[in-house]
Image (spheres, rainbow, N blue to C red):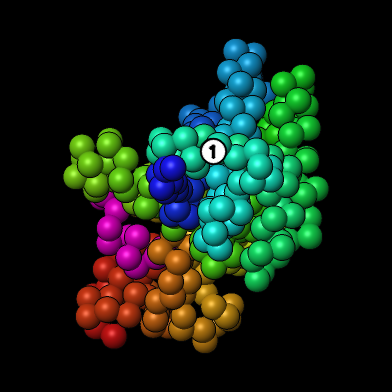
Amino acid sequence: MGTAVIKDIPNAKDFFDSGIELFDFAWDIVAELITNLFVAEREFEVDVKDVSEEYWAASKRRLTTALAMTQQGVEFIMKGKIAEISPYLLLAESALRWPSPYDGHELTFSEFKMVDAQDLVRIHDTVQDRPLPSDFVDRSNAMRTKRNRIAHSIDKELQVHTTEVIETILFFYKALFPEENWAKTRATFIRNYPDATLSGGEYSTNDVCRELESVLALLPPAAVETYFGISKKQYLYLCPTCLADGGHHVDFDHKLAALRPKGPTSTTLYCPVCDREYAVARRDCDQEGCPGNVLAADEEPRCLTCGRWQETEL
Ligand SMILES: [Zn+2]
Ligand SMILES: [Zn+2]
């Protein structure tokens, strides 16, 4: 008679790490398309209408790949949420059909059949305190049909699809990690990419901010508010930390931080990349031609509209 102990029992963190990494891969693919187009339009004045057919054909494949990765990521993370309660809840079938513990060989978790992906929502909502959002199942189904639609779509619809894929990733990340902020998670990934470490990480902040700026330009205002906590209708400012961290051999002009609350006397600025608030001073910028009146509240104050240092202390 064997004394079986199951080996390789997965834990929640392993599932979460794999799932979030897939989200990042998916995001990376789509964000690159968006950023390249944004930069082409803004800096090289390329008209989106003139973008070649080959470009869109390649984009199509990237978008469907990104959706497949997102879907896989969602499944991993849901398994993680269930494994938080107990990994054994992931076992399908009745005990009679499990591999025998009496054969004298070690059992590994992977020998057991796992529950079907379609059952994960029901298991999750049965055992976890906080149920998934009510539109979670609909959005999951929509993700599957969207892959088909993109594969058969014509060029001019692809920009719409690109936005939808980005929104899909954001929706599922927020649904699964309501307390987290995707911009910050993404920033952590970019700062740890191999090419970021090559340049000493100096330009990672520029990359993060340029990417987020491009994505925000594309997203509808409601999505920007829901997923990034800032309003597209508000004037946005430089973030004191992102500005200080960014590489300055090029101009750092990425404005992503918003006053909270909005208003002429507000002294709190929120940056979605840092996912934190900063105290700011309200005084007119003393540099010529700048209408700014939001300054980083530091010993050596800097204007968060034009980025220039101030000649007079606060
Ligand atoms: Zn920041
Ligand atoms: Zn200024």
Q: Is residue 264 visible?
A: yes
**The residue stretch that appears in magenta:** 235-251
Quadrant where the N terminus sits is top left
Q: Name the one closer to the observer, 95 or 188.
A: 95
- Residue 7: x, y in percent? 40, 44
Task: Indicate the amino acid at tag 1.
Answer: Ser
Residue 289 occupies quadrant:
bottom left
Relative height, residue 295 to residue 113 (above, below): below
Quadrant where the C terminus sits is bottom left
Main SS type for the magenta part?
Answer: loop
- Residue 266: x, y in percent? 51, 84
Q: Name the one closer to the observer, 83 or 202.
A: 83
The structure residue drawn at horizontal position 32% and vertical position 80%, both measured from the top left corner, is 297
Label 1 beta carbon less than 8 Å to ligand 1: no
**Hey, which residue is sitting farthest front in the picture?**
1
Relative height, residue 243 to residue 101 (above, below): below
